[in-house]
Image (tube, helix red, strand yellow):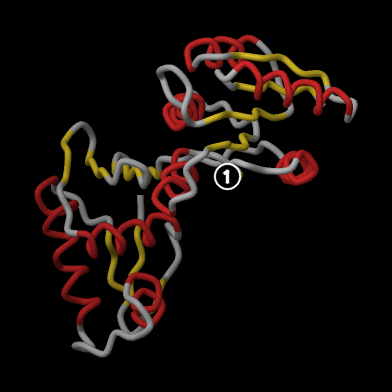
Amino acid sequence: MRLLVVEDEPKMASLLRRALQSDGHTVDSAATGTDALGRARESDYDALVLDVMIPPPDGFEVCRRLRAEGRWTPILLLTARDGVKDRVEGLDAGADDFLPKPFVIEELSARLRAIVRRGSHARPVRLQVGDLTLDPATRTVARGETPVRLSPKGFALLEFLMRRRGEVLTRDTLLEHAWDAEYDGASNVVDVYVRYLRDKVDRPFGRQSIETVWGVGYRLNS
């Protein structure tokens, strides 16, 4: 495999390079986010090993920019921070896997093999249905160029509808995916939030993208 290792700490970069070369890989190196973007744009790599804490732009932003440009090379993020928030941010930015430091080289190699086997087919980070867009990483929604502010629950419901665009989703399915398993509130909560979403993303723009399928549930159309 041809790999790009992005690490600004010289000793760690050298260690990674030697270890991966000893596994038979061709390895290029970069020490900054700017250099990483330049190399990833110029060359076709089988995978990127990308440290989060590099000189700007950081690893999260490098991920976001590459994915926004339609570049789907598998990315393995490395970080000394092992918080859930960081893992979520990295995966939402478009990374394929996340490995906290310290780690053993054998695990790094195994994870690289796994993400390369999964392939680099397009996996858009930003969801789009017609001119309605939703970005899970920045938690933003827009209709065309107009930002739309949603409550956290409204955002969760819209995200699920967009991920399953064109499918008829029952109220039970929507309840299961947008509310936790312990929810025992009003049975019409899905209908209430669908009306809320229509008031936010449809009616102000003269659209009717959220369709009621009588007796079944709802469907999001383009």
For disc 1, the marked residue is 100
What crowding class fits label 1: few (fewer than 14 Cα within 10 Å), some (14-19), or many (20 or more)?
Answer: some
Please state the horizontal and vertical placement of residue 136, each as a whole percent of the image. Answer: 36, 47
In this view, 69 is above or below 197: above
Which quadrant would residue 16 be assigned to in this image? top right
Please state the horizontal and vertical placement of residue 169, each as a whole percent of the image: 41, 72
Q: Residue at x 47, y 43 (%)?
A: 81
Q: Nearer the viewer, residue 14 or 25?
A: 14
Percent of width and height locating residue 92: 44, 45
**74 sits to left or right of 197:** right
Q: Position of residue 156 (x, y in %)?
A: 31, 61
Is residue 63 or residue 215 the one in the foreground?
A: 63
Give me the residue at 90% from left, 26% from top.
24
**Amino acid marked by disc 1:** Pro
- Report the label total: 1
| Residue 161 position (above or below residue 102) | below
Label 1 element class? strand
Q: Quadrant of residue 39?
A: top right
Query: Is 4 or 213 nearer to us in this picture?
Result: 4
Residue at the spot 38% in from the left edge and 61% down from the top edge: 160
Q: Residue at x 37, y 43 (%)?
A: 137
Which quadrant is the N terminus positioned in?
A: top right
Residue 105 appears in which quarter of the rendering?
top right
- In the displayed structure, 22 sits above or below 92; it is above
